[in-house]
Image (spheres, grey):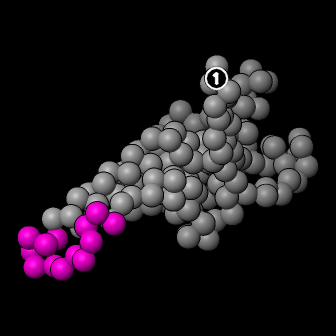
Amino acid sequence: MFTIWNSRAAVTFIRSARLSIVSGNNSGIAADSSKRSFVTNLRQQQRNMSQAAGSHEYDYDLIVIGGGSGGLACAKEAVANGAKVACLDYVKPTPLGTKWGIGGTCVNVGCIPKKLMHQASLLGESIHEATAYGWEIPNKEAIKPKWENLVQ
């Protein structure tokens, strides 16, 4: 089950907590665990923020920090549920200058490429063993992998 917080409430709560901390006022953050106290407190903080900063429209329902496989899965699921999503990703180049775009290590140079190459090798092996299972292969020697095509 995937749940998306109401972004305005979540952002308002975060901004309210930050305002309370900056102003040294901790009374704005609910210590009581009851839902009513939390919601009441949240509404009061929202009113305080509106008066202090004026009204503000938020452009996104969800901001995902990290464009790796987990971040992209989260963003995709949120979009599928109708949310407007921003994905923030930063890759610090390695000492050799290696860097890649969105997708992180797993998608670009780790898990996914490894699985693709492993599957390609299994297919090649299966083709060469197919004659033992009744398949007719006219020229087994002509069946060769083109690794350059795989890694494009």
> Residue drawn 50% across and 48% down?
107
Is 6 above or below relative to 14? below
Q: Is residue 15 magenta?
A: no
**Residue at 51% across, 59% down:** 149
Q: Nearer the viewer, residue 70 or 107?
A: 107
Residue 121 placement (x, y as % from top left): 30, 54
Tell me residue 147's x, y (percent): 45, 53
Image quarter in which the N terminus is found = bottom left
Q: How many marks?
A: 1
Is 132 left, or right, of 79 in this rendering? left
Q: Indicate whether 77 appears above or below 133.
A: above
Task: Give residue 82's quadrant in the image.
Answer: bottom right
Q: Quadrant of the C terminus?
A: bottom right
Q: Is residue 6 above or below residue 111?
A: below
Secondary structure under tag 1 reads: loop
Q: Which residues are magenta?
A: 130-142
Left or right: 125, with 7 as reference point: left
Front residue of 83 and 37: 83
Q: Which residue is mark 1?
A: 96
Task: Give neighbour class at mark 1: few <14, some 14-19, many 20+ (Cα, 10 Å).
Answer: few
Q: Is residue 39 visible?
A: yes
In reply to whether residue 134 is colored magenta, the answer given is: yes
Q: Is residue 65 visible?
A: no
Residue found 52% across the figure and 63% down from its top = 77
Residue 105 in the image, given as x and y percentages of width and height = 51, 39
Front residue of 108/55: it is 108
Q: What kind of residue is marked 1?
A: Leu
112 or 90, nearer to the observer: 112
Which residue corresponds to the image point at 45% horizontal and 58% vertical from the top-left? 146
In the rendering, at what x and y percent does residue 85 appear?
Answer: 67, 58
